[in-house]
Every structure is written in structure tokens, then in C-alpha cells.
Amino acid sequence: MGATAVVTEMVAAAGLSRRSVKSHKLLRFHPEEKPIGVQLFGKRPEDFERAAELVSNLGFDFIDINAGCPVKKVVNSGSGSALLRDIPKLTAVLRAVVSHTHLPVTVKIRVGWSPQEPVPDSFPALLADEGAAAVAVHGRYRSDMFSGEVRKLEIERIVRNSPVPIIANGDSRSVNDALDLLDSTGAAGLMLGRGSLGNPWIFRGLSTGKPEDASPLPGEIVSVIWKQYWMMSEYLPAIHLHSIFRGQLLNYIRSFRGAAELRGRAVGVDCREDLADILTELEELLSAERQRNL
Ligand SMILES: Cc1cc2nc3c(=O)[nH]c(=O)nc-3n(C[C@H](O)[C@H](O)[C@H](O)COP(=O)(O)O)c2cc1C
């Protein structure tokens, strides 16, 4: 849809380093998912050394280090955003990865642990000195978790102090939100998460610069949902496919007349025939909505 690059979900460096099958499965990607980065999380530099060696020859284009995850279990183990409070550990991890790969290395951070503990002004230069090629910043503190307004001023402060490109992230639900985040922070790029769920066209709107390119016709919406279904079916065991796909499907069924009722049916989809019925109805409802809005 025009995204410049994509990144895997976070994969445990410790898991890869002890060759866990579960962690290895998270490294699979589709040939169309390019350029692609692999995100590693953990805290022990030795784990990152082995993980970096292992992922470097699998076709990834860069390695990203997670220093932003706010989840309790991750933070309590000293990983994710806990690394924001332990700069020596974070730089040791970064050094371990940079010295064990030929790929560019990036870091994903938050703007700090809490309003009382923002990342210091010297932080981006420190990461750059250790070899970070770029830094992605989710504009929240760890203490914000996922709520409250994105702190654009804090991202802008990091941009101002950074010798390497900063990628701004947080709450871009529309092309206009995303452009506003870019403008107000002066960042070099954007990273989108939740705003692309059920709306992959947001990347198209951003890459062409035309917000209307992020509003596809009903037929295209349905054909992209089918494509996503077939792609997921290549990767998921048949018994899990429908229950996992339902979560994705629900993201597409919102903000039109009849959506609530159709969502009620979509939560029960458990075979391809059910999905076909739902998508036929989705296309009809979207077409009716379009007529009303013309
Ligand atoms: C369900 C879920 C899973 C996430 N998993 C990761 C992850 O594995 N690695 C990561 O760096 N960020 C992860 N994030 C955070 C997003 O990358 C992003 O920073 C955050 O959601 C804010 O951006 P958004 O408003 O565009 O979604 C996750 C977020 C959600 C909601």
C-alpha cells in the first residue's frame, strides 16, 4: 500500500539465542513484506549478540531494538521501556547488536519513563554514537501506557537533539493526523500502528499525499480482506486461522450504517463460507453508505 518498510512484532533475543522454535516462528515473513526489519527485545547483551548473528542472514533489511514496550511482564524483566532507565544496559545491548550484524540497527523508544524521568537531551546522540542508524519514538511515557494525548513537544525535543533521523509514532488514525504529527515534530518519518488496522490504505494516502487515496471503493476493501485472509492462511494452522482472522476482520467493519449488526455476525466466523457471506454483505452495506454520502 506504499509503506516504506515494515517491522516484525517483537521477538525475544533470549528465545532466539537458545533456538526456541516459538521465537523462530515469529521470524517468518512473506516475500512481499519488504523492506522488513526484525525487532528484538531482551536485556542481556550476550543474547542480543547471538540473536543478531542469527537474524542477519535471513533476508531482513534492518534490526530494531525494543526499548519502548510498557507491558509489566516485559518491564519487570528489565526489557522494553525499562531500558530507558538503564542507559548503560541499553548502550551495551546496542553495541552487542551493531558489532554482530552487517545490517543497519535502529532503536524504538518512548519519550521517557515518566514526566519526571524523560529521556535526557543527550540520549539520541548517545544512541547514534553507539551505531544507531535511526530512532523511532512513540510519543508517550511508559507511565502513560497507551492512553492520553501523544506528546508531540517531547518528540520534537528529541528530533532537535538527534544527529540521526527520528521516526515519530503515536495515534495517527488518518492521513491528516499523520501529516500533522510529521509537521509538528519535524521528524524524518512516521511509524503507524493501530491506525493501519482495518485501514492499510492510510499508507497509500500518505505515500501519494492525497487523503482520498486512503478511501478505497467497497470492492477494493473486500478484495484486500480476502488477500489478507489468504496470506494469513499460508502462515497459520487451519484450526487457529478463523479465530485469529476474526480480530483482523472486525477492524474493517466500523463506521457505517449496519456495522454493529454485521460485527455481531463477524465475531462468529469460523469457515471460509461464513466469511464469503459476511464480505458480500459488507460490500453491499459499504456501497449503500457511499450512495448516501454522494
Ligand atoms: C497490540 C499491540 C502490539 C504492539 N506490539 C509492539 C511490538 O511488538 N513492538 C513495538 O515496538 N511496539 C509494539 N506496539 C506499539 C506500537 O508499535 C506503537 O508504538 C503504539 O501502538 C503507538 O502507535 P499507534 O498509535 O500508531 O498504534 C504494539 C501496540 C499494540 C496496540
Image: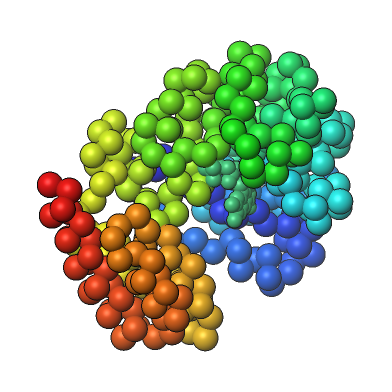
Q: Is residue 178 left or right of residue 141?
A: left
Which residue is more in the foreground, 209 or 293?
Answer: 293
Q: Is residue 33 left or right of residue 133?
A: left
Q: Residue at x 76, y 62 (%)?
A: 15
Q: Residue at x 28, y 60 (%)?
A: 257
Q: Residue at x 30, y 39 (%)?
A: 205
Above or below for 268 versus 285: below
Q: Residue at x 72, y 26 (%)?
A: 127
Above or below for 91 versus 129: below
Q: Quadrant of residue 67?
A: top right
Which residue is more in the foreground, 196 or 1?
Answer: 196
- Residue 138 visible in the picture: yes
* Number of marks drawn: 0
* Residue 8 in picture, x, y percent from top left: 56, 53
* Residue 233 in picture, x, y percent from top left: 43, 76
Above or below for 27 versus 264: above
* Residue 153 in picture, x, y percent from top left: 60, 19
Q: Is residue 142 left or right of residue 184?
A: right
* Residue 193 in picture, x, y percent from top left: 51, 47
The colour scheme used to paint the residues is rainbow
Which residue is more in the foreground, 89 or 187?
Answer: 187
- Residue 101 visible in the picture: no
